[in-house]
Image: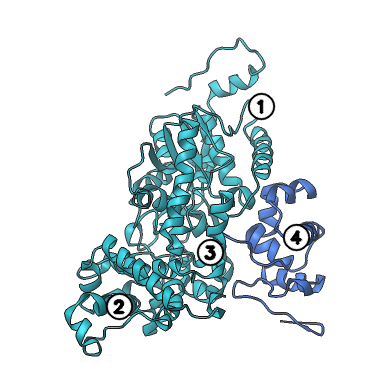
């Protein structure tokens, strides 16, 4: 991959240095010089725990960045570099960072949560990604996805026609499933209340979550639309470390929302998509959004809580456990709605241990899923999650993140877990009961003077 | 993996490194890893369709075409290939790994 390219020249080192200085300013120098080398982070890292070599120790990974900081930002580092283990930035150093920052860290942030002094270990490691992105040393499989997003508006380079055809096809299925010919999946409708963003994976390979969302929106009589141009909730700029690309991807969506005149952007179940769009986006753009954005999970909980959709939990009789995607829960702060939802829509909900903000990464985060070169490590580091799932005794794993879902499918196969992986949206859709009013609407749907149906609340 | 007189190599995701040397025997061997003892007619229909589409377009087909062209429902596809269309069916069809969240 990129390792086959020649190391960068002096200009590359200067560019990387510039990116380093800017990253340090953004995160704050305190994060680069506070580490007391206690090593506690080793006990928190799924990669280290499943392969305890020093190369996988979070503090070791962060140290590769911190020693560059010492060289340029501290008195002793500047004048007595070898004494304090300070390291000048060279092309060889940059080259050696590739595996450390992309191949040995999923940026899940569990180390930072448990850090004895509370510095943000994984963001320090991500500084390495920012430097490498600046000089074009992002692993090519990861960079291909960023390029797709910039040039086509979606990470899988799905043509617009294909999106439209897929939506039409799904709509036909949905009509059959809901036994209602009036169901539509609105595309590019201006003036709707909600713009719903999806993961392109839902169009290309796994459309049942989009079908479920459309069914829920219909039942709740929501005013919504998807866009045929910029519907991608994801942002691989977060993974590659390229903040300029990340800002451009964010801007595409914000501009589209403004163009369609929606009141709110709702993000489908995608962990890093949520973190990127909800939290990192304003930083990348350098300003707050003038439009609100929230996770689909909050909206679904609102529908259930206010009675806009009716639920029969006996339709989900099997034990369900919940995976906590790092970017949604630990980084994004969305922990409650999915739990409230699952407790209402199934008969037997079982938490994993540990769970919530203290969860383990599934191993597929940080762009790991798209970098085949680290495939073995990805599966090995997911063994902790596999054990958690097995111990829960669940038959179904709710995964509110499409990226995690793919990794969990892999773990299911490799560790013979015998479970099904579903999005929360699908599980809710499965338990949804159509209102009597709704059903009478079906029989009256041809009559144009039929009454205006309001759901019972 | 040795199939006949050919040595088949895979990347660390289990996708073929040289998609060009794919054959029905290779497909069945990968299918076995996917827990498919013997590929049924439906398995073959989907896999052959993916292969043909890829050879013509250099892309994995979207699941819509997979379903409509082979008269299978989307829920059926997941039953046939428990790892899903990408890591299951496309892998058996000898394609390189598709980009992105798969």
Which chain gets the cyan colouring? A
Instruction: Find residue A131 and report its image quarter.
Output: bottom left
Residue at disc 2, secondary structure: helix
Question: Which of A38 and A291 lies nearest the eye of the viewer?
Answer: A291
Is residue A83 placed above or below A286 in the rendered structure?
Answer: below
CA separation in Å, label 1 and label 4 = 35 Å
Q: Nearer the viewer, mark 1 or mark 2?
A: 2
Instruction: Find residue A186 and report its image quarter.
Output: top right
Residue underneath mark 2: A68
The answer to the question of whether label 4 and label 3 lie on touching residues, with beta carbons closer than 8 A, is no
**Where's residue A244, x and y in %?**
43, 56
For disc 4, the chain is B
Asked if residue A370 shows in the view, the reply is no
Q: Nearer the viewer, mark 3 or mark 1?
A: 3
Quadrant where the C terminus of chain A sits is top left
Residue underneath mark 3: A143
Q: Residue at x 35, y 50 (%)?
A: A279
**Where's residue A31, x and y in %?**
24, 68
Q: Residue furthest bottom?
A: A83
**Where's residue A167, x and y in %?**
64, 39
Is residue B86 placed above or below A274 in the rendered structure?
Answer: below
For disc 2, the chain is A
**Position of A83 compared to A56: left or right?**
left
Rendered image: mark on residue A181: 1
Q: Residue at x 75, y 57 (%)?
A: B57
């Amino acid at each position: 991959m990129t390792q086959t390219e020649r190391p960068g020249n002096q200009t590359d080192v200067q560019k990387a240095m510039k990116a380093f200085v800017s990253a340090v300013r953004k995160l704050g120098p305190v994060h680069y010089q506070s580490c007391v080398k206690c090593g506690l982070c080793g006990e928190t890292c799924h990669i280290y725990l499943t392969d305890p070599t020093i190369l996988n120790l979070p503090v070791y990974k962060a140290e590769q960045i911190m020693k560059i900081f010492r060289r340029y930002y501290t008195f002793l580092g500047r004048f007595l570099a070898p004494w304090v283990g300070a390291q000048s930035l060279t092309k060889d150093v940059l080259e050696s960072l590739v595996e450390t920052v992309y191949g040995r860290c999923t940026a899940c942030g569990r180390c930072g949560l448990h850090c004895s002094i509370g510095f943000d270990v994984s963001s320090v490691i991500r500084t390495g990604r920012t430097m490498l992105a600046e000089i074009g040393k992002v692993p090519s499989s990861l960079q291909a996805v960023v390029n797709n997003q910039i040039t086509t508006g979606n990470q899988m380079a799905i043509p617009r026609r294909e999106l439209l055809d897929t939506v039409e096809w799904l709509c036909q299925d949905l009509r059959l499933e809901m036994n209602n010919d009036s169901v539509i999946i609105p595309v590019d409708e201006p003036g709707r209340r909600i713009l719903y963003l999806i993961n392109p994976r839902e169009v290309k390979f796994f459309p049942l979550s989009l079908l479920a969302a459309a069914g829920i929106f219909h039942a709740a009589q929501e005013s919504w639309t998807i866009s045929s141009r910029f519907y991608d909730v994801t942002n691989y700029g977060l993974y590659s470390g390229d903040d300029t690309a990340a800002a451009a991807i964010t801007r595409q969506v914000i501009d589209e929302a403004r163009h369609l005149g929606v009141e709110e952007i709702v993000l489908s179940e995608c962990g890093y998509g949520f973190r990127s769009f909800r939290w990192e986006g304003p930083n990348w753009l350098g300003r707050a959004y003038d439009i609100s954005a929230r996770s689909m999970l909050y909206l679904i909980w609102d529908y259930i809580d206010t009675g806009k959709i009716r639920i029969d939990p006996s339709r989900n009789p099997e034990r369900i456990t919940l995976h906590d995607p790092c970017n949604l829960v630990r980084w994004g702060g969305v922990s409650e709605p999915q739990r409230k939802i699952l407790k209402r829509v199934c008969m037997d909900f079982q938490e994993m241990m540990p769970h919530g903000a203290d969860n383990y990464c599934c191993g597929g985060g940080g762009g790991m899923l798209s970098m085949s070169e680290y495939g073995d490590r990805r599966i090995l580091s997911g063994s902790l999650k596999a054990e958690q799932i097995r111990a829960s005794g669940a038959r179904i794993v709710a995964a509110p993140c499409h990226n995690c879902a793919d990794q969990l499918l892999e773990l299911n196969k490799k560790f013979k877990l015998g479970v099904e992986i579903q999005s929360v949206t699908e599980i809710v859709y499965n338990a949804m009961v159509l209102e009597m009013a709704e059903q009478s609407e079906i029989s009256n749907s041809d009559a144009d003077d039929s009454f205006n149906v309001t759901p019972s609340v | 993996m040795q199939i006949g007189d050919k040595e088949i190599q895979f990347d660390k995701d289990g996708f073929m490194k040289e998609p060009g040397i794919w054959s029905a025997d290779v497909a069945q061997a990968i299918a076995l890893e996917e827990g498919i003892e013997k590929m049924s007619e439906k398995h073959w229909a989907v896999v052959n369709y993916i292969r043909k589409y890829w050879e013509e377009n250099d892309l994995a087909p979207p699941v819509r075409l997979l379903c409509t062209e082979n008269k299978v429902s989307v829920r059926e596809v997941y039953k046939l290939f428990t790892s899903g269309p990408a890591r299951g069916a496309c892998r058996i069809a000898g394609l390189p790994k598709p980009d992105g969240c798969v």
